[in-house]
Amino acid sequence: MNAVPRDGDKSQVIALILCIVVGGLGIHRFYLGYTWQGIVQLLTLGVCGIWTLIDLIRIITGDLQPKNGTYTTTL
């Protein structure tokens, strides 16, 4: 089994950790491939945490998927 993710492979666990640790900066959005949303979230600091909280819930429920498809590793 290849432990190194291929280009485009995204982990739901990594997205969740990024959202928890640096969610207000939108880093999880960049990771998932949503560059423009990441920039807006970075500039607004996650709209005082509300946007980040919504993203956190969406990542946990699996509603916020990577731009190129689905997660290769899920919770």
Image (spheres, grey):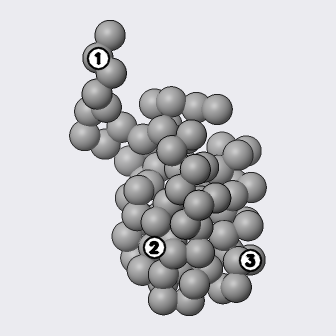
Q: Residue 36: x and y, percent?
A: 40, 76
Dot 1: what SS?
loop
Q: Earlier in the sequence, mark 3 or mark 2?
A: 2
Question: Outermost residue, top direction?
Answer: 1
Q: Which mark is residue 2?
A: 1
Q: Marks 2 and 1: which is nearer the front?
A: 1
Location of mark 3 (residue) = 50
Instruction: Pinpoint residue 72: horizontal percent, then vertical percent.
Output: 46, 30
Residue at label 2? Answer: 38
Q: Left or right: where does residue 38 sit relative to residue 53?
A: left
Q: Whole-Å distance between the Cαs marked 2 and 1? A: 29 Å
Task: Identify the residue at horizontal 42%, vertical 41% (top origin).
Answer: 10
What separation in Å lies between label 3 and label 2 (alpha carbons)?
14 Å
Badge 1 amino acid: Asn
Residue ID at (38%, 47%) = 68
Query: Which of the 4 quarters of the picture holds residue 39?
Result: bottom left
Mark 3: amino acid = Ile
Would you identify the image quadrant in which residue 6 lies?
top left
